[in-house]
Image (cartoon, helix red, strand yellow):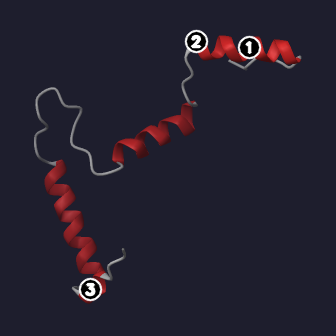
């Protein structure tokens, strides 16, 4: 379902309203033991940004399996 925000208020007004709401929420103190206050999909965005910069972490067990398979088919092991 898509909603035409312009039916209710000007798009710039909507963006301003949502921006203020986000600012207010993010300025709230986080719950004890929490990593912070995140908007929907923000954690996934931050993880994707880290993965693009540093690569996707792969467990040693998976690396071992991939290296064994690479050796079996005669290709180079997974670069480190």
Vertical order, 59 against 5 (above or below):
above
**In the picture provided, is 80 more to the left or to the right than 34?**
right
x and y percentages locating residue 67 in the rendered image: 73, 14
**Whole-number angstrom distance, CA of label 2 to CA of label 3:** 53 Å
x and y percentages locating residue 71 in the rendered image: 83, 12
**In the picture provided, is 42 more to the left or to the right than 10?**
right
The numbered mark, 3 or 1, whose residue comes first in the sequence reads 3
Identify residue for label 1: 67
Q: Residue at x 42, y 46 (%)?
A: 45
Q: Quadrant of residue 4?
A: bottom left
The quarter of the picture where the N terminus appears is: bottom left
For discs 3 and 1, the disc positioned in front in the rendered view = 1
x and y percentages locating residue 33 in the rendered image: 16, 26
> Element at badge 2?
helix
Q: Quadrant of residue 5?
A: bottom left
The quarter of the picture where the C terminus appears is: top right
**In the picture provided, is 16 more to the left or to the right than 68?**
left
Residue closer to the observer: 53 or 57: 57
Residue 60 bears which disc, if any?
Answer: 2
For discs 2 and 3, the disc positioned in front in the rendered view = 2
Query: Contact (CB < 8 A) between labels 3 and 1?
Result: no
Q: Residue at x 19, y 56 (%)?
A: 23
Vertical order, 73 against 38 (above or below):
above
Identify residue for label 3: 10
**Whole-number angstrom distance, CA of label 3 to CA of label 1:** 57 Å
Q: Residue at x 66, y 10 (%)?
A: 64
**Whole-number angstrom distance, CA of label 1 to CA of label 2:** 10 Å
Question: Crowdedness of circle 1 by 10 Å Cα count: few (<14), some, many (20+)?
Answer: some
């Amino acid at each position: 379902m898509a909603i035409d925000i312009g039916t209710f208020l000007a798009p710039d007004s909507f963006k301003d309203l949502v921006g203020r709401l986000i600012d207010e929420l993010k300025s709230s103190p986080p719950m004890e033991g929490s990593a912070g206050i995140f908007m929907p999909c923000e954690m996934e965005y931050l993880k994707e940004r880290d993965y693009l910069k540093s690569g996707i972490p792969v467990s040693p067990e998976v690396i071992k399996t991939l290296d064994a398979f690479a050796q079996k088919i005669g290709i180079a092991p997974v670069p480190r």
